[in-house]
Image (cartoon, rainbow, N blue to C red):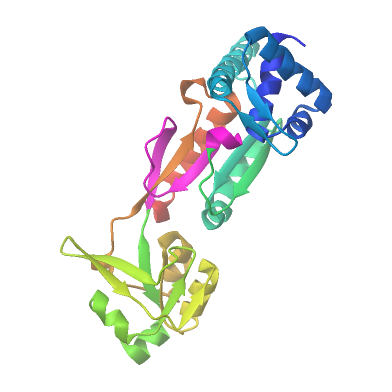
Amino acid sequence: MDRIQAMAAFLAVVETGGFASAARRLNVSPSVVTRAVGELEERLGVRLLTRTTRFVRVTEAGTTYADNCRRILADIEEAEGTAAGAHAAPKGLLTVTSSSNFGRMYVAPIVRRYLAQFPKVDVNCWFIDRMVNLVDEGVDVAVRLGELPDSSLQAVRVGRVRQVLCASPDYLRQHGAPQRPEDLLQHVTIFATGITPAPDWRFRDGGKPVTIRLQPRLSTTTNEAAAESAAAGLGITRLPLYQVAQAVREGTLVLLLEDFERTAMPIHVVHREGRHATHRVRAFIDMAVEALRDDPNLQ
């Protein structure tokens, strides 16, 4: 196996977490991948991976080498794309991640348009409510809500998410509307545990933080159930604006205490390749940035 193929095999092991999974990605036998990594380690004179019967871990030298392999392989793909012509179609596998609700509502439609435009690309979507490590888990692009930790990842800000209080007109006719955050203690509340695990709603009053500890009548693990229960007149809930924007436009939900909202959370499109982004990654980033920035519910 030549050196470039061996690098690709090693990187596949790092990104998928095993020899068998790397072999499936590359459509070769596990023995081919094992031999390629062994040849690399022999040539370099260092251990790149620590292997046991239960797991494969990357050594410190292996982590550095994987970063260099990723850069080199991206440069090769870019060079080939340039040689093939500036308008050569993206191809290969793209892996995208986002939170479950936002991914379903906003990222999935972008993926469908992307697939229609680029028929030679396949896409894996990871819509899960945990922080995915793009480098360790081999993910190309993430759409993330909230402040980003310091990292070497590249990020493009595309919008913001307001956390809004809302209730149905029927509920407000019967119980009145709260005028201040502390008034919520006298109201029926619906708590979506997916936003925060503790039943606390935080506000800002004249620049000062205010926290209201609730005793919700209903707690639910899904934002959809909280929104539907509020629209049915059960009580007041707090959700991302994008989740209830249509209901607000249709008048089935009314926004409350807007003057006391906390600062909106930023939305970023995050990727790990920087200027070495492949054509398929760059094409998806460009499409996602344009689509998310054009959405009024996210601005």
Choose top left, top right, bottom left or bottom right for residue 284: top right
Residue nearer the viewer, 65 or 249? 65
Q: Residue 293 appears at what percent x and percent y? A: 42, 44
For the N terminus, give its image quadrant: top right
Q: Residue visible at 38% across and 47% down?
A: 159
Residue farthest along the front direction in this orientation: 52
**Residue 161 in the figure: left or right of residue 65:** left
Residue nearer the viewer, 187 or 232? 187
For the question of whether residue 47 can be seen, the reply is yes
Instruction: State yes or no: residue 217 in magenta.
Output: no
Residue nearer the viewer, 98 or 280? 98
For the question of whether residue 177 can be seen, the reply is no
Instruction: State yes or no: residue 144 in magenta.
Output: yes
Q: Residue 250 appears at what percent x and percent y? A: 45, 72
Give the tally of numbered discs: 0
Q: Residue visible at 65% across and 12% down?
A: 84
**Residue 158 in the figure: left or right of residue 126:** left
Q: Residue 184 appears at what percent x and percent y? A: 31, 80
Choose top left, top right, bottom left or bottom right for residue 238: bottom left
Q: Which stretch appears magenta?
A: 134-160
Choose top left, top right, bottom left or bottom right for residue 22: top right
Residue 269 vertical placement versus 196 (above, below): above
Residue 53 vertical placement versus 127 (above, below): above
Q: Residue visible at 37% across and 36% down?
A: 150
**Residue 274 in the figure: left or right of residue 50:** left
Q: Residue 117 appears at what percent x and percent y? A: 64, 35
